[in-house]
Amino acid sequence: MDIREKTQIALALLFPAAPVTEVPVVAEGPPPPRDAGVVIQDFPRCGSHLDVLCRPDQVVAVAQIMDTEGFFLESIAGVDWLEKQQLEVLYDYNRLGGEHCRVMVRTLVPRTEPVVPTISAVFPAANWHERETFDFYGVHFQDHPNLIRILLPEDADFHPLLKDFMP
Amino acid sequence: METSIWRALFYLVGIMAFAGLNAAYLGWCERKGAARIQRRIGPCEAGFAGLLQPLADGLKLMSKQLLVPQGVDGIIFRVAPVLAMVPAITSMVVIPFSGNIEARAMELSVLLLFALASLGMMAILLGGWASGNKYAIISSARAVSQNLAYEIPMLVTVITIVMISGSMNLREIALNQMGGFWHWNIFRLENGHFLTMWISFIIFFICSVAETNRAPFDMAEAESELVAGFMTEYGSMGFGLFMMGEYLNIVVGACLTTTLFLGGWDCPFGKTPGVWWFLLKIYMLIFTFIWIRWTYPRTQIYRLLNLSWKILIPFSLANLLITAALIKVF
Amino acid sequence: MSGYWSDIFTGSKSLVTGLLITGREFFKPVVTEQYPYEVPTMTPLFRGHIELIGNEATGQPNCVVCGMCQRACPSTCISLDGKKAEGEGAKGKVLTSYVLDFTKCSLCGSCVESCNFNALRFSKEYNLASFDKNDFIMDLLKRLEDQNRCKQ
Amino acid sequence: MTVPISLRHDETFVLNLGPQHPATHGVLRVILTLDGEYVVKAEPVLGYVHRMHEKLAEGGTFAQFMPNTARMDYLHALAFNHGWALVVEKAAGIEVPERAEYIRVITVELNRIASHLLWWAAFLLDLGGFTPLLYAFDDREKIIDLLERVTGSRLTYCYMRFGGVYNDIDDEFIAGTRAFIKRLRSRMPRFYHDLVTHNIILIKRIKDIGFITPEQCRRYGATGPVARGSGISYDIRKNEPYSVYPEFDFEVPVFDECDSMARYMVRMHEMEQSLRIIEQALDKLPDGPVMGKAPKVLKPEAGYYYSAVETARGSLGYRLICDGGKNPYKLKLRSPTFSNLSLFGEVAEGMLLADALAFMGSLDLVIPEIDR
């Protein structure tokens, strides 16, 4: 039973209701909204094996599962879906050595008050990545040890990567 | 030794000229030597093959403004570079360039040399502490511990030499080694000294490299860590004096090594001793200083102190005992 | 104690080999190129700033003012305009001014790649240092005329 | 040899290893709280050379972002070009002819050796050895001339296009590369190993310095030579094969001493492996076109795409999100040195200042890649 099935089953425990579906490659528009769950993707086409959509409060649980499975946090990215008035935080987990498996974990938060719990307790790598996402998108990470700007000057009051940011 | 005023004046001008020329043109030699080792040309624009480069550097340094950082003890800040130069030049008084060319042959000239060497260390400490810059304080702390650690093995090896030649006067030590290289202290073929003398030569050479903060031991002005070490806050001639002080310390170190180990002004084949042999040996040693600098990376402060306390001092003490035993036996 | 002696022995041996290597290098010939006296020759595909190609016979630029390069450039460095070609039966446009703002150009080659009329190429210009920013606002049409004039 | 002394007493002072410092190779600032010469706390401050490449990507079309990729890690710019080309080809479904894949691998590996040579030179400079820099640059100049012959530029390349490469390589390039391989192989034992690697001063300077445990690597996401120096055999060319790498046989050098010496040896062996790859690629170089067919204006399907490439410093990831338009909707650049540096604070604690700088040199930092 290779690592992909193992992680997929471990993650599926978090979402009792949602069945595991094989998403066909959809043509138009951003991927259709769906409820929380684990989706298998074909790796050569889009670069990641599993696509997990979870609620913001489950982020730490997912991180703990990933930690026990021996993944490492590759990066945290923010996405600003302006027309749906939603900010999305996207975690990339990957295997360090051994058999390859990349898991993409996504959470959607409303644009008005974007708050996501921090996972820097589980993965210290997240400390800087979360500071950067806060820096560019304004996503506030709860009880992050030192949530200040990392790349922009300290006195910057704007979040440049938001779609409605006019310099 | 008649003490006419002309003789004193002649030696005053002679030593100042020797020191000034050496301080300037050692910089040029270093840059040319480094360039050749790195397969490039080195200074070649100013004058023929860059010979006027030291002049150009000197003028540049003099034309710059000497900034004194605010809130710093001005007097000590200005005195430190001068204090780096003074001991180096005064120690040239006792160095026997050749049979009759020597400013003042004193009985305890070896002792005077080492007293002045530790005075040079004082200059680095003052320079670093007075400039109030964090990098400078770290570098002067390092320089003091380094010079202290390397003076002990140096003194112990000098005791071995003094024991062999029986007098503290550099002139006597040199005269004692006259007549061909087999009489030189480094080989010393008679009464079995050849066993240990080359070890003490190596120890002495390592210590003189460390004493002048050069090459693998340049912890004091480590460019890549402490920016410019104790010289960080110094502008024009302050920096210039420190550099000249460093080069003069190298010259004094080389003269000392030549006099103690390589037979001063003696010709290797025992025929025509003269000042040329002395200068040739000095510049051979100075070339090895430059050669070492451009070959090795820098040691770390703990390794440096370990090298001295754990390796050089035990070896030099053992060397001292063996030589004492050999003298007793033969 | 064994580490003590082996350290000293291997250490000094490695120090001596290091000295021998640099010593041998000391006597070898110089490798560097003395720039102001020896001038480097650029390879055929070297990318200096772009320049116009004039056809051999008339020396007129091949450019037909289609503006493809202007659109392709990521940092909008090219600004060109032309006027209708009057005179007997000459159709299309004639280039009147072609200005390249080299301060913003990142030499990506999109303009040369997108030009279908073989009117642009990379020059072999490599010493581009200057004190004044306006020296980098280049009028390529004038440069083409200078090249034609010095060709005669 | 980090001496476990109690560091928490009061008279510490803060030293700014400021943005302008010879050992940071770029504009990185580290706020060091020192007790004497021991580092009590080290906190890197970033952002001095931040240009917001991610917003630039959203502004222009896919092709217009290619020159930007070379401006992030200018020492291994071709790998960044390669990563961007791969992710857009994956998104838009563009085929790349066989010969172009081989040329891409050859130029990327040459660029990797040039990057390692420059790291080696700068690392020795940090440790105080000045001459090795000139010998390394002598070799690196040969590579730069070769790459200039085929790509047109010397440091920031814009050579790869979606579906192939900009121009083909000629016989003179192939002959030059073979001559370079022979030359570097003959110089490697003398100038790199005898003069430096076996030198007792260097060994004492970087051995047992800067311990990074494999667990720390995993929790901080350190990849590349930093991870391979701590016993983790993770090389994207092997673990997540892309392009034509599966057709070459090369080993991934892994050392498990976890100290700076191990990271040093990993990079030295990697240079040898890259030479092997180039040799095999030159032998098996197929003929054929160099540029596949790619639409002028790319409109890839909407979706989440990710491609990872092995650069000289670690795994570079492009997280691309397209919404069907002709501009990337969102591009996240996962830069390897960003994660490698994040463990500096934890590992440098209790070290000497000189060791902390030697450790930073062994991490092989390129600051524009951290700040993006």
Image (spheres, rainbow, N blue to C red):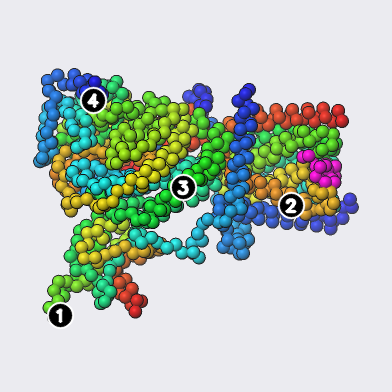
Residue that carries the numbered disc 2 in the rendered image: B280
Task: Give the Cα separation between the discs numbered 1 and 2.
Answer: 86 Å
Inspect this view and state whether residue D214 appears: yes
How far apart are labels 3 and 4 at the CA level? 44 Å
Rendered residue at 26%/21% (across/down): A65
- Read off the residue under disc 1: C87
Q: Is residue B178 magenta?
A: yes
Q: Position of residue C118 (x, y in %)?
A: 24, 65
Between label 3 and label 2, give the one nearer the viewer: 3
Camera-side residue of B137 and B94:
B94
**Helix, strand, or loop for circle 3?**
helix
Kind of residue sitting beneath label 3: Lys
A22 left or right of C95 in image: left
The secondary structure type at the circle numbered 1 is loop
Closest to the camera, between mark 1 and mark 3, is: 3
**Is residue B87 depicted above or below A31 in this figure?**
below
- B49 with respect to D7 (left or right): right
Q: Residue at x 18, y 21 (%)?
A: A12
- Do the dots labelled 3 and 4 sit on one chain? no
Q: Which mark is residue D182?
A: 3
Q: Quadrant of the C terminus of chain C?
A: bottom left
Report if residue A95 lies within the magenta region: no
Chain to which the residue tagged by mark 4 belongs = A
